[in-house]
Image: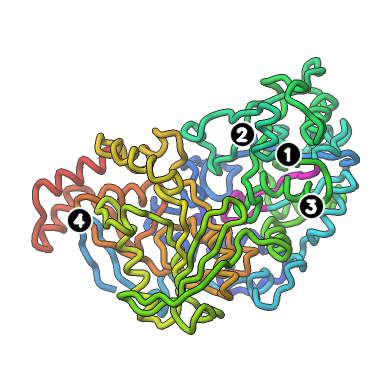
């Protein structure tokens, strides 16, 4: 079921966006609110790809895309139970609209009153979402060798995992995990630890078709294992992966335990269960690995959602926490970026204050251009924001292959016209995170017929490698609380919970469509879920008719569109 279909089902059932909620029983209804405000687009459009996954109709997946149930596992030492106007541009029909005053799909619904983002300026980061345990409580459980149940956002995977510290694993706790989860027991480890233990990626980034791009390594067992599949032997393997004195010679490959490579920065960089598992283990003072596995329903093996997870947690005496609460907990105690300088920068669009930041994870410098009263001009509510990924070819040299430079110009003009706003410029994200040299190689592949997604994958990279946690922390540091986000990319909506940010509106940036960038824009819509208001990509015949009505397009342009559509 996609988020949009989930929204239809919920609204059809009588739960409106404005209905008052009082507790976590309404947690899943937020999928409807998310869909109504982020993906109310023409049928067959974007919603099924919000998670970056396939269009699988698996009943066990509540947000579109294939189920990832065969994927992770967790356990512990005593981890036992109980413990507008139409505009035609090159075949694209765009409906203009005032997103600030209209009641169209681009207007965001109000945040539910029970959610921490409802009042981010006064919410204590250590106070859990009502109905869930605090992170401090969860850490005590993990340190004591018990499981906790961890849920991610309903607009991500919308699932709960059993999570614990790997070095606390016992045969008893492993038996419990196997009994109530998918049984694919996974262990989250840092890249350096995986390298030391000689655990390379199972498949290259190009071959990784997992919806969340989970970084599986080759499987392993302890060298002393007989079969490696029993609860006791799997427990021993997991515990050794969490032993800081372990070495590569103590494991055989392949095996029956699935290590996962953790993203540096943890949940502050990627709000996934892989990162949550290791973050919880380390914060609890345990070894360098966290164990995790998806909880499934006992009667049919389908993925457990909030109501079933609440019942499960109560039955077995387990604490239940949210990854978004873990983000808030970590954000209170640590940051990914530090402010380094600020200066007045006059531009053709007006005078901005440039504020520079340095990432503590990789040392990359980023910058925020603030329009208003110096660096504090963006503080408060309803701030117009653009989070822009660096594109040297488009932003500086005005390449016609993409719409990046045009979008940056339009964003700066909008902020200046508004009299207040922020442009966050994230460096190190060339080619959606693959780097300048690889982007130029991708251009050569595109000239040979590959689209922008296929070219990245041919080079061994994901379609999109970017993360927006750094941008969220920059906005938080600038005092921004609620934002009107200038973007066509739904991925920028996700992962903001816990950073004290609430997206209250989306303002699209429609760049001019040309012969050079037309196929690129179509691919972003069709394969990457980018939204262009109420646009429709017409068939070549319809496009020709529409173009003719507006004065006509060249035969070469129509042929280019037809060929581009086939290749995409």
Q: Nearer the viewer, mark 3 or mark 2?
A: 3
Q: Nearer the viewer, mark 1 or mark 3?
A: 3
Give the distance between the C-alpha atoms of the residues marked 1 and 4, in whole angstroms.
Answer: 52 Å
Residue 164 within the segment the image draws in magenta: yes
Q: Magenta span covers which residues? A: 152-165
For label 3, the crowd category at 10 Å Cα-Cα, with few meaning under 14, some 14 to 19 and many 20 or more, is some
Give the distance between the C-alpha atoms of the residues marked 1 and 3, in whole angstroms.
Answer: 35 Å
Whether tag 1 and tag 4 are in contact, CB under 8 A, the answer is no
In this orientation, which residue lies closer to the viewer: 480 or 109? 480
Measured as percent of width and height from the top left, residue 215 is found at 59, 37
Q: Which residue is mark 4?
A: 90
Q: Which residue is mark 2?
A: 216
Q: Residue farthest to the top? A: 226
Measured as percent of width and height from the top left, residue 113 is found at 66, 74
Among the two numbered marks 4 and 2 on one chain, the one whose residue lies closer to the N terminus: 4
Whether tag 4 and tag 2 are in contact, CB under 8 A, the answer is no
Among the two numbered marks 1 and 3 on one chain, the one whose residue lies closer to the N terminus: 3
Residue 299 vertical placement versus 305 (above, below): above
Q: Residue at x 81, y 42 (%)?
A: 165
Measured as percent of width and height from the top left, residue 118 is found at 64, 74
Q: Which residue is mark 1?
A: 299
For label 1, the crowd category at 10 Å Cα-Cα, with few meaning under 14, some 14 to 19 and many 20 or more, is few
Q: Is disc 4 placed on a helix, strand or loop?
A: loop
Among the two numbered marks 3 and 2 on one chain, the one whose residue lies closer to the N terminus: 2
Q: Which residue is mark 3?
A: 283
């Amino acid at each position: 079921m996609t988020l949009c279909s989930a929204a239809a089902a919920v609204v059809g059932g009588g739960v409106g966006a404005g209905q008052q909620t009082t507790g976590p029983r309404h947690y899943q209804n937020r999928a409807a609110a998310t869909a109504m405000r982020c993906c109310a687009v023409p049928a067959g459009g974007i919603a099924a790809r919000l998670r970056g996954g396939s269009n699988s109709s698996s009943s066990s997946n509540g947000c579109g895309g294939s189920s990832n149930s065969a994927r992770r596992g967790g356990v512990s030492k005593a981890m036992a139970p109980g413990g507008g106007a139409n505009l035609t541009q090159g075949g694209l029909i765009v409906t203009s609209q005032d997103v600030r005053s209209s009641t169209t799909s681009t207007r965001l619904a109000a945040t539910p009153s029970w959610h921490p983002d409802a009042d981010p300026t006064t919410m204590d980061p250590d106070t859990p979402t009502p109905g869930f345990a605090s992170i401090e409580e969860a850490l005590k459980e993990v340190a004591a060798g018990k499981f906790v149940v961890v849920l991610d956002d309903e607009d991500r995977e919308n699932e709960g995992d059993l999570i614990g510290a790997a070095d606390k694993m016992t045969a008893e706790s492993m038996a419990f995990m196997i009994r109530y989860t998918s049984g694919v027991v996974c262990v989250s480890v840092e890249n350096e630890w995986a390298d030391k233990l000689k655990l390379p990626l199972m498949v290259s980034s190009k071959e990784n078709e997992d919806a969340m791009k989970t970084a599986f390594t080759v499987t392993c067992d302890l060298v002393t294992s007989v079969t490696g599949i029993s609860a006791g032997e799997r427990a021993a393997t997991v515990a050794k992966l969490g032993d800081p004195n372990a070495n590569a010679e103590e494991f055989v490959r392949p095996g029956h335990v699935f290590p996962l490579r953790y993203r540096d920065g943890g949940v502050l960089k990627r709000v996934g269960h892989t990162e949550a598992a290791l973050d919880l283990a380390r914060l609890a003072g345990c070894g360098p690995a966290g164990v995790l596995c998806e909880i499934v329903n006992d009667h049919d093996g389908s993925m457990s959602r909030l109501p079933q997870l609440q019942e499960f947690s109560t039955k077995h005496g387990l604490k239940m926490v949210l990854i978004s609460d873990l983000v808030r907990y970590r954000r209170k105690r640590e940051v990914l970026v530090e402010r380094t300088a600020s200066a007045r920068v006059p531009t053709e669009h007006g005078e901005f204050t440039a504020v520079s930041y340095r990432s503590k994870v990789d040392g990359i410098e980023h910058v925020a251009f603030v329009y208003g009263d110096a660096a504090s001009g963006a503080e408060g509510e309803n701030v117009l924001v653009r989070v822009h990924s660096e594109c040297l070819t488009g932003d500086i040299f005005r390449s016609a292959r993409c719409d990046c430079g045009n979008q940056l110009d339009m964003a700066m003009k909008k902020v200046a016209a508004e009299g207040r706003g922020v442009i966050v410029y994230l460096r190190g994200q060339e080619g959606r995170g693959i780097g300048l040299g690889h982007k130029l190689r991708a251009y050569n592949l595109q000239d040979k017929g590959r689209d922008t997604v296929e070219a990245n994958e041919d080079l061994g990279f994901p379609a999109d490698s970017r993360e927006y946690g750094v941008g969220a922390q920059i906005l938080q540091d600038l005092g921004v609380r609620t934002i009107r986000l200038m973007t066509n990319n739904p991925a920028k909506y996700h992962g903001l919970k816990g950073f004290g940010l609430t997206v209250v509106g989306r303002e699209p940036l429609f760049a001019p469509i040309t012969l050079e960038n037309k196929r690129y824009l179509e691919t972003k819509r069709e394969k990457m879920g980018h939204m262009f208001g109420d646009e429709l990509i017409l068939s070549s015949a319809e496009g020709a008719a529409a173009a003719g009505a507006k004065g006509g397009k060249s035969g070469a342009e129509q042929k280019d569109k037809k060929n581009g559509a086939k290749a995409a």
